[in-house]
Image (cartoon, rainbow, N blue to C red):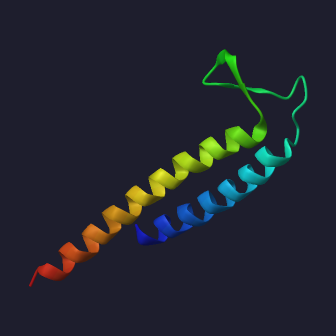
């Protein structure tokens, strides 16, 4: 579990950095290159914002994995 948490943390960090660079430079913000948020055509995002949302969700998942791994690690030490 700890290994998976480390891998997800690294990937989410890379996604957040790439998404931030992409969002700040408005890369690929063209007429046909917009993403609808959850299929809602009224809310259009560029690729950077979409990657930031995915990176944020992966960060939340990796934090939860870290918490579960730490609890499992501490509970194993308490048993005789």
Q: Nearer the viewer, residue 56 or 4?
A: 56
Q: Position of residue 17 (x, y in %)?
A: 71, 58
Tell me: residue 40, above or below residue 74. above
Q: Nearer the viewer, residue 43 or 51?
A: 43
Quarter of image, res 75: bottom left
Which image quarter holds the C terminus? bottom left
**Residue at the spot x=31%, y=71% of the render?**
70
Q: Position of residue 48 (x, y in %)?
A: 75, 43
Residue lying furthest bottom: 80
Tell me: residue 75, above or below residue 51. below
**Residue at the spot x=61%, y=50% of the render?**
55
Q: Is 23 left or right of 8, judged from the image as shown?
A: right
Q: Is 8 left or right of 23, judged from the image as shown?
A: left
Which image quarter holds the N terminus? bottom left
Q: Nearer the viewer, residue 23 or 70?
A: 23
Tell me: residue 76, above or below residue 65. below
**Residue at the spot x=80%, y=27% of the render?**
34
Q: Position of residue 8 (x, y in %)?
A: 54, 61
């Amino acid at each position: 579990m700890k290994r998976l948490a480390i891998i997800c943390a690294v990937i989410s960090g890379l996604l957040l950095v790439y998404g931030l660079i992409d969002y700040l430079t408005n890369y690929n913000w063209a007429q046909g290159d917009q993403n609808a948020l959850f299929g809602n055509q009224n809310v259009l995002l560029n690729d950077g914002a979409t990657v930031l949302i995915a990176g944020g969700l992966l960060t939340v998942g990796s934090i939860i994995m870290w918490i579960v791994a730490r609890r499992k690690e501490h509970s194993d030490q308490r048993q005789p």
